[in-house]
Image (tube, helix red, strand yellow):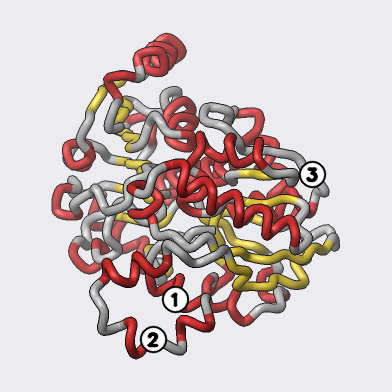
Amino acid sequence: MSADNLEDIYRFYPFLRSFNWFLKRQPRIFRENIIKYLPPHKFMDIRNVVSKTGLKIDGIAVMCPYVPKQMVTLGEKVVLKKIISSVRLAKKLGAGIVGLGGFTSIVGNEGEIVAKEVDVAVTSGNTYTAALALQGIEKAAQILERPLESSVVAVIGATGDIGGICAKILSRKAKTLILCARKIEEAVDFISVLKKSSRTNIIIEKYADKVASQADFIISATSAATTIISPQNLRPGAVVCDVSLPPDIAKEVIKMRNDVFVFDGGKASFLNSGLIESNKWKGIFPNGIIYGCLAETMILALEQKFVNFSIGRGNITEDKIKFISELAERHGFSLAPFHCGRYIYTQEDIQRIKNLIS
């Protein structure tokens, strides 16, 4: 996995912690330059992952030491080299399948190039992440009593792997669907297929903040290295499922706006998370909430399906979403509670939001 920020990387490399007093006083660019030369590193053992069926697996977590900005700016060849080294380390340490977490799944056509260069099964985890995003937006619509069928629904990052399948499924459910991406005007075939297969009114938009002012529901699933949605631009009553890592909207939104419902999407809960033997696991994933990409990897391992799964752009299908969702339920994985950052919404919060936006 890659890290969302420099602090995560320094935290998981023990020898760097010894120099923390010095590094904290250095400019960010200095600290970023250091991590460019760090090797991949196993930072966590994951023991006693027990399925609802009684099946059990163990795992490891390997750090690919780049932050999102570096994944974007250093060049694909350089970044791929370190991702491939990270996957090979995981294989050497005994992994039967490797999940590409964070930005590591974006480089090289959603893991396709990485999968060709290693002799271990690989998945980006995007199929279950997309399934969870859809479950989240549909559950939010249900509990807030705001049907998608009478709403303006938007997908930001609509030409991406997760956004594309979400747009396809939502094009049959929403009253109006807004497709937003940086190069949306170039996705002629994708737009044409959606328009032919749906009676939904489809709008094309290039800028995320314009979408924010128009949509009732938003799934945001981009590969942006920084936030792209301004909280003040959300229309009153907007519901936002933010799937992106790093997030597309700052978590401070819950302090700035009490008339919108913004939650982290693409996350799962694991029924037996409390049985996992790892103090680091509990620190990284409090309350048993884990990334959909990690959950997908664990599910495939529990099923002993050591084959490439969510690999290559455009290969997520509705059948694969149904398949991984059924396996998830079988093993005790489900949609995570609604939360924004570390804050988990209570029933009172949801009722308050419902009252404000109804």
Q: CA distance from mark 1 to mark 2?
A: 8 Å
Q: Earlier in the sequence, mark 3 or mark 1?
A: 1
User: Which percent across, then down, holds residue 319?
Assistant: 65, 28
| Vertical comparison of 305 with 154: above or below | below
User: Which percent across, then down, holds residue 341?
Assistant: 38, 66
User: Which percent across, then down, holds residue 102?
Assistant: 48, 53
The residue where tag 2 is placed is 20
| Quadrant assignment, res 117 | top right
- Amino acid at pointer 3: Lys
Give me the residue at 33% from left, 87% from top: 22
User: Which percent across, then down, holds residue 347?
Assistant: 42, 66
In the drawing, does residue 158 fall left or right of residue 13? left
Q: CA distance from mark 3 to mark 2?
A: 41 Å
Give me the residue at 19% from left, 54% from top: 231
Q: CA distance from mark 3 to mark 1?
A: 34 Å
Give me the residue at 65% from left, 33% from top: 320
Other residues around mark 1 within 10 Å, as few (<14) / some (14–19) / many (≥20): many
Question: Marks 3 and 2: which is nearer the front?
Answer: 2
- Amino acid at pointer 2: Asn
| Vertical comparison of 10 with 295: above or below | below
The residue where tag 3 is placed is 305
| Quadrant assignment, res 290 | bottom right
In the drawing, does residue 148 fall left or right of residue 287? left
